[in-house]
Every structure is written in structure tokens, then in C-alpha cells.
Image (cartoon, grey):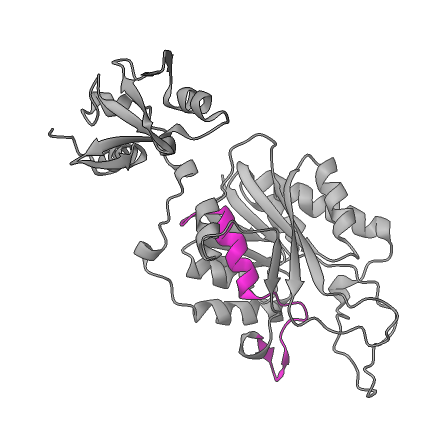
Amino acid sequence: MPTLPLNQILQGDCIEILNSLPGNSVDLVFADPPYNLQLQNDLYRPDSSKVDAVTDKWDRFSSFSDYDRFTSEWLRATCRVMKDTGTIWVIGSYHNIFRVGAIMQDLGFWILNDIVWLKTNPMPNFRGVRFTNAHETIIWAQKKKGKRYTFNHRSMKALNDDLQMRSDWVLPLATGGERIKFNGAKAHSTQKPESLLYRVILSSSNAGDVVLDPFFGSGTTGAVAKKLGRNFIGIERDRKYVKVARKRIDAIEESPAGALILPEKRNQPRVPFGSLLEAGLLTPGQSLFLKRDKSVRAVVLSNGHLKCQGQVGSIHALAKSLAGRAVNGWEMWQYKENGKLKTIDELREKIRASKVQGQTFDL
């Protein structure tokens, strides 16, 4: 079986290279495929200066059916190399994203979100015949519906001033010092901002994961992946872009490992409530208190259930019955330690830490 070419840029046709990679090996994919903009004529500003639009040959297709065939082929090849738990992000505009989304669904991908990237500095519509195109759409999908996938909810919330991050991302274009230049001109006509890839990679991968970009371009995915301690695989057919991306990524300094390990609770090992009794962190007969009503007291039974107000059940079932809605029992029940109330989730974290460090409790 071929090995994964980690942290390399592979030059050539993306479909051929994807088909040469080992299957079920990639954790995350970010794809910025050709948009098929269908530009017919040059575009000029009101002062008669020419707009530096996307006129590259790689964005030209003879028909919609030709574009659809290409899209189906690269998505099918990408699906093969993704792990069953993997997810994919595909960015596009109104020119192509609806066609891409339909093909993804036809191939079995399960769409999780569509993200709207709202540009703070979009290019105006100089002809004044349409609304300014001020956004692009990103489809986020998993390979197989129902499989457990990575979503670092708490990290994204922390990135957003402790507010749950929404699906509309207000971010600027890559301009100024961030814009990569080659001989004084734009190195790539559709370079994406690092802030966009930062959210994509931080939200849906973990340190050490493999991030694949089949349309690598100027290397934004690889640059951000390196900063965040992920491995990357880039595929790019244009030798000039490969050279630009390699130079860019080589200049990136890796972040210290201690700043990259951000454990999310949903990705951590499951800890049964009974483990707290087995470890001696709680004892049968001990009282627990409902967080939102300290007058509600439950007794811990020897089998790990709680008894309260004539009801017996798990920490979750009993909390749900008392609260009248679904709740997380780990966060709803508190115990007393040195006269202070603390959530039992703190005890669960002690169990997790002991498993990682090989400790035992001496109580």
C-alpha cells in the first residue's frame, strides 16, 4: 500500500493523483475548485481601467455538462481517500456551488452546513447591472451520514468571544501584505484569506490530522495547516503555483505543541458515572444537589443511579425529569467539597486525567 505523502505538494492532475493515494486515509478536505465563471468579455472600471478578473484557462469549461463531469470525477476520487469519519469543505460562488452541492448529494455526501463568507471588501459591480457579489458559499459535508466526525464546538465558541459561532462569517479578502505576489503581480487570482482557512481547519480537525487540498493554488491551506500543527497534502498542476506555495509554507513557523492540544469534550473518552464511585471520588449515600435549585437533593446509590423525590434513575434521566427538558447531568448535579459546591463534571475530568497519566487515586 502506498504511503501518504505528508506535507508535500504533488504536481499534476488532481484526479490522477487522488486515485494514486491510499484510500480511507485523510481526515479533512478543503477544496477551492474552478468556479466556471463563464466570463465572456473584459471588465472595465468607470475610469476605463481594466479589472484584474479571473481569466485563467483552468477556470474555462466548454459546457455545464463538461463542468459537471469534472466535478463528479474529482469529488468521487476525493471521497475514496477520505476516512469514513472525514469531512469536506467546498467553496464556490453562484456560478457553480449549486451544481457542486447537487453532485455531492448524488455521490452520498451528507451536508452538515452551508457557510456564507461575507466579504468586508468585495469588488464593486462596475457596470451597475447587478448587485455587488459580496459573498461566497462553502458547503461542509461528511463522507458518511451518521458517522462520528470532528467538530470543535468549544474552540470555535472561544474564537468568537465565547459566543456560538454562526454560519455567516464576516472576513476580508486576501489583500495588502497577505496577498502573495509573483514578479509584482498577483501570484494567484483566487487566493483565499488565511482567516477563512483558520476557521475551517480549527473547527473540523485536530492536531496531527491530515488535511488535503486538491486545488492547492498559492498554498493557503498548507500554510494554515502548518501553523495549527496539522499535516497537509497539496495537489496542484501549475508548476508556478507549486513554487509559490512551497516558498510560502517553508517560511511558516510551527506553533508550539502545547498551544495546539485543545481537547473538546465530545471528542474525549466516555466516562460512566459509576467510575466516580469505583474510584472513590463519590460514595454511596452521598448527597448531590441540583445546580439550579439547591433545595433539590439526590442520594447516590451504590449502582451509580440517583434517588430523588421518589424517583430513581441515571444522572441524566433524573435531571431531565426534574428540569422538564433534556439536560446534561454532568453539568446539572453538584457535590460538596470543603463546604463548596462543585459540578460532578470536575470529577469526570479527574478520571480522564488519571487515564492519560496512568494515575490511581489515593483517597
The correct choice, above or below, for 109 with respect to 195 in the image is: above
Residue 282 in sight = yes
**Residue 72 lies in the magenta stretch:** no
The correct choice, above or below, for 170 with respect to 353 in the image is: below
Q: Residue at x 83, y 51 (%)?
A: 66
Q: Position of residue 74 (x, y in %)?
A: 68, 47
Q: Position of residue 316 (x, y in %)?
A: 41, 24
Q: Residue at x 68, y 34 (%)?
A: 108
Q: Residue at x 79, y 86 (%)?
A: 49
**Residue 188 lies in the magenta stretch:** yes
Question: Farthest residue in the front direction?
Answer: 295
Q: Which residues are magenta?
A: 179-208
| Nearer-the-camera pick, 62 or 11 | 62
| Nearer-the-camera pick, 315 or 94 | 315
Occupied quadrant, residue 147: top right
Q: Position of residue 160 (x, y in %)?
A: 49, 56
Q: Is residue 158 left or right of residue 200?
A: left
Figure quadrant of the C terminus = top left
Question: Farthest residue in the left direction?
Answer: 362
| Nearer-the-camera pick, 320 or 130 | 320
> What is the total number of numbered labels drawn onto the structure image?
0
Question: Farthest residue in the bottom direction?
Answer: 47
Q: Is residue 112 left or right of residue 313?
A: right
Q: Is residue 350 left or right of residue 15?
A: left
Q: Residue at x 27, y 14 (%)?
A: 301
Q: Position of residue 164 (x, y in %)?
A: 51, 49
Residue 5 in sight = no
